[in-house]
Image (cartoon, rainbow, N blue to C red):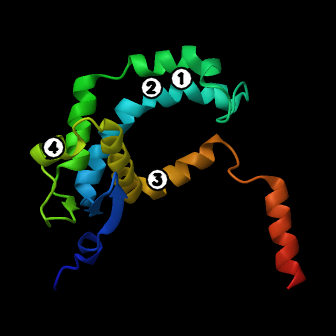
Amino acid sequence: MQANYSRRVEGKEVSVGGELFVIYPFGAFTAANLSGELGSMLGPMIGAIAPLVADKKISLDDDVATAAPQLATAFSSLSGEKLERLMKKLLCSKNIVTKADGEWLTEEMADEIFCGKVDEMFQLAFFVLRENFGGFFEKAGSLFGKLTQEPAQEALTQSATAI
């Protein structure tokens, strides 16, 4: 029987800071390993902020100053070493190809590309997370309440029945 690796062969092209990258999905075991690291890193941050959103003390549109104490608590658990290790795993695990030269993104290349542009490095990491864990975050989002508003849902129903 022949194995089918087609899901790992198809990459998604993204543009960050004028650079084009092709992101390939992680293998299932690599993704599971990263899930544990993401959970241990993001769990305390989400735990500190989630009660505010759930209790409607703030919304995501509110001023950041409203949530500053909770954000400070959330980010106090963030370690620079852990974040660096996670970023290297997300970006330099032979899962991203630079479109310009067709090479796997390495730590040295990332240092050169993102020197002085760390925000763009985080943008690329976000694309990697979305490509590999997008379905998980969509499903987890439903734990925090409805994602759609009732009026929009009613309008969709009315349009659908008018046809």
Q: Which mark is residue 136?
A: 3
Few, some or many C-alpha atoms within 10 Å of disc 3 (few <14, some 14-19, many ≥20)? Answer: few
Q: Are marks 1 and 2 in contact (CB under 8 Å)?
A: yes
The residue located at (65%, 19%) in the rendering is 66
Name which of mark 3 and mark 2 comes first in the sequence: 2
Q: Residue 134: image x %, image y %?
A: 45, 56
Q: Which mark is residue 44?
A: 2
Name which of mark 4 and mark 1 comes first in the sequence: 1
On the rendered structure, is 74 left or right of 53?
Answer: left
On the rendered structure, is 55 left or right of 163?
Answer: left
Few, some or many C-alpha atoms within 10 Å of disc 4 (few <14, some 14-19, many ≥20)? Answer: few
> Which dot, 4 or 3, sits closer to the camera?
4
Amino acid type, mark 2: Pro
Name which of mark 1 and mark 3 comes first in the sequence: 1
Q: Which mark is residue 112?
A: 4
User: Where 141 sits versus 58, above or below?
Assistant: below
Few, some or many C-alpha atoms within 10 Å of disc 1 (few <14, some 14-19, many ≥20)? Answer: some
On the rendered structure, is 61 left or right of 140?
Answer: right
Mark pair 1, 2: CA separation: 6 Å
Q: Quadrant of residue 12?
A: bottom left
The residue located at (40%, 16%) in the rendering is 76
Name which of mark 4 and mark 2 comes first in the sequence: 2
Query: Where does label 1 land, which residue?
Result: 48
> Which dot, 4 or 2, sits closer to the camera?
4
User: Where 62 sits versus 88, above or below?
Assistant: above
> Which dot, 4 or 1, sits closer to the camera?
4
Mark pair 4, 2: CA separation: 32 Å
Q: Residue 139: image x %, image y %?
A: 54, 53
Q: Quadrant of residue 102?
A: bottom left
The residue located at (85%, 63%) in the rendering is 154
Secondary structure of the residue carrying tag 4 is helix
